[in-house]
Amino acid sequence: MVDRRAVTMQTIADSLGVSRSTVSLALREAPVIAEATRQAVREEADRLGFVPNRSAARLRTHQRRLVGLVVPDFANPLVAATAAGLQRVVGEQERVLLVSSTFEDSVIQRRVLRSLIEEQVGGVIITSVIGTTAAELAGLANAQIPAVLLNRMVEDFPAPVVARSAADIVDLAFDHLYVAHNARRIAYFGGFIDASPRRDRLEHFASRIAAAGLPSFPAWASPPSTSTGEARDTFMTLVAERGMEIDAVICHSDTVAMGVLRALANMGIQIPVVGIDDLDFAADMTPSLTTVRTDARGLGELAGRTLLALMGSTFEPAAEPALELIVRESCGCAQDS
Amino acid sequence: MVDRRAVTMQTIADSLGVSRSTVSLALREAPVIAEATRQAVREEADRLGFVPNRSAARLRTHQRRLVGLVVPDFANPLVAATAAGLQRVVGEQERVLLVSSTFEDSVIQRRVLRSLIEEQVGGVIITSVIGTTAAELAGLANAQIPAVLLNRMVEDFPAPVVARSAADIVDLAFDHLYVAHNARRIAYFGGFIDASPRRDRLEHFASRIAAAGLPSFPAWASPPSTSTGEARDTFMTLVAERGMEIDAVICHSDTVAMGVLRALANMGIQIPVVGIDDLDFAADMTPSLTTVRTDARGLGELAGRTLLALMGSTFEPAAEPALELIVRESCGCAQDS
DNA sequence: CTGAAAGCGCTTACAG
DNA sequence: CTGAAAGCGCTTACAG
């Protein structure tokens, strides 16, 4: 409101005829400063529109209030939901989130991590590019920056992994299709090849299939697809090439499930479809999507709390929110309700 | 890799027996330093795992490489897409994005803006909380931080507004319904009451309606709805209360359109529906959504370029990507293809 | 071509 | 209760 030169503590000190130390202590509400002085300093600071320079404070104290979030692409609705949960936790602590997408490019990831270290972030939450090794994350450890691995594991990197249980997710979907819908030729479809959550899910899925003595359909699991459009096209190609050899599908995500539902509609075929995530729009697809709710927002909050705990904050450890199967129309349960 | 104390330029200087200045100049590739020295410094820096401290550099130089993004909620897919475009532009310049959601809460917005100023961001892109006044953004101006208003206008605040033309959007949707589908009882539905883009669209919509001598249906425009579920419920309530008095709908967003399509399906009614945005999933709804493509990603890039230009970067000014009507099934055009 | 010195804006012992 | 001084890690004139 007042000046065009940056106003610093010195400005306030001069204007009040006190020292910088007094201003600093007064603004930080140090009880050692006389109430009258504190008051005067606060008022003058407001009048001048003083805003403390965090860079300077950080340089002096090594306090670190920034939190870095590194994800493949936050245009992905699942990622965006997770980030929103995280932001909630981080924002409550007056911390600020530095967000970067890597677009699955390890060169960008390297650059981004370096930037975050340079900015002296207090911690990092990362869904690392596929194929990332512990060595590529070593910079964080060297800079003593605590990290949390979100969803994707990195072999030999000593950081907590926050992710939903792949086995539990698969069990919920599989059991419903197998028991409630008598499906016997079940496929897992979609996702990023080689991402650890998908690998874990596929592994558990294979063991359930084997234990139940059911046939497996690896061809349906192999082509990658993450976007809705990709999923739709890939699924239609598979049906064209192999025929409708399956009688139910577990989709890697709701986004993928939407493409599969569209493919099925295009071809006039109906088989039970179960998604994973329960994103906002799952309830309003036609047919509405039966899906395993993974509560991305809750997971983001959990990741945030886990990181903040590593950074020294204390709060009651948040329980991991429970997974839940949300039954709707796409599996055939409520098709005509 | 080596030490647990932070390694600074002093560490490198000591280890090499040169001065801090030499290290600083060498690392910044100053031609004044002998090539051999530069080489030695670079190698030692790598060996020690040196990462420059941006806070210190910023304090000294007042360079500002951080860019702040303030949005209502980046879990909103439209916002996420815009943010992704922005990140692309910002990332190319080795800049880092500070992202904060305000959840439409002006108290949070105030806190967030203050944090960004404290962190010495070089610029801010903001979709401000509804009802934000220029006074609430004055802190940015005082701190001489350039700003770009994304989508939402703020009266009397001297910053460029980056948004798609409300009139053009409405024209594309209206003309298609009016001309191609002979709709005569057209409603605009959904969105946040009082957000400036919606106000502008409604205003232009009203003028088109009036010019064509068509009846208007303000009741359909008034109840707010931004999420898919909200839109679905609100739409069903309207139909229940008022009967099916309209024969076509322009929806404020694809997200809203999805809810409307679901509501129509629930009630077994078919009228032409046009969305706005063309998000990824629009092509794969059932029916697939006819919508005005606003290219959120492109808009994010444009906002980024606009801000960077304000911050002093120069590049060829990006043309605003054109709006385009994407015709699919939901308007009735390709229902059976 | 390289070094000594000053200073960015803050915080924190330490005197008084 | 308040002030003078040192120092965080960097950059940039200015000497030499």
Image (cartoon, coloured by chain):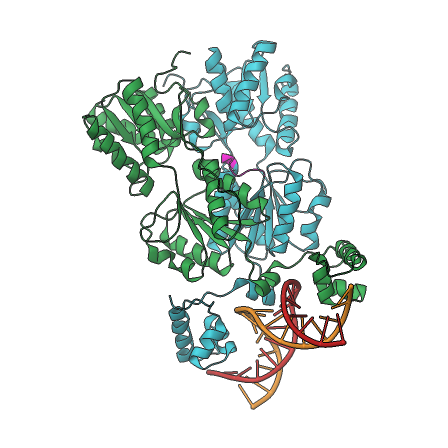
Chain colours: A green, B cyan, C red, D orange
Q: Is A26 included in the stretch rendered in magenta?
A: no
Instruction: Determine the image quadrant of residue B129.
Output: top right
As drawn, is B154 to the left or to the right of A270?
Answer: right
Looking at the rendered image, the quarter that the C terminus of chain A falls into is top left
Q: Nearer the viewer, residue B168 or B308?
A: B308
Q: Position of residue A281 (x, y in %)?
A: 46, 27
Is B170 left, or right, of B38 in this rendering?
right
Q: Residue at x 33, y 51 (%)?
A: A132
Residue B41 percent across, percent down from the top left: 42, 75
- Where is residue B253? Give x, y as percent: 53, 28
The boundaries of the magenta stretch are: B72-78
Residue B56 position (above or below residue B279): below
Quick check: A117 left or right of B149? Answer: left
Q: Quadrant of residue A242?
A: top left
- Tell me where residue B333 appears, x and y as whole percent: 44, 19
Q: Does residue B269 sit above or below A179 in this rendering?
A: above
In this view, the residue in front, D16 or A66, is A66
Measured along the vertical axis of the image, is residue B164 above or below residue A158? above
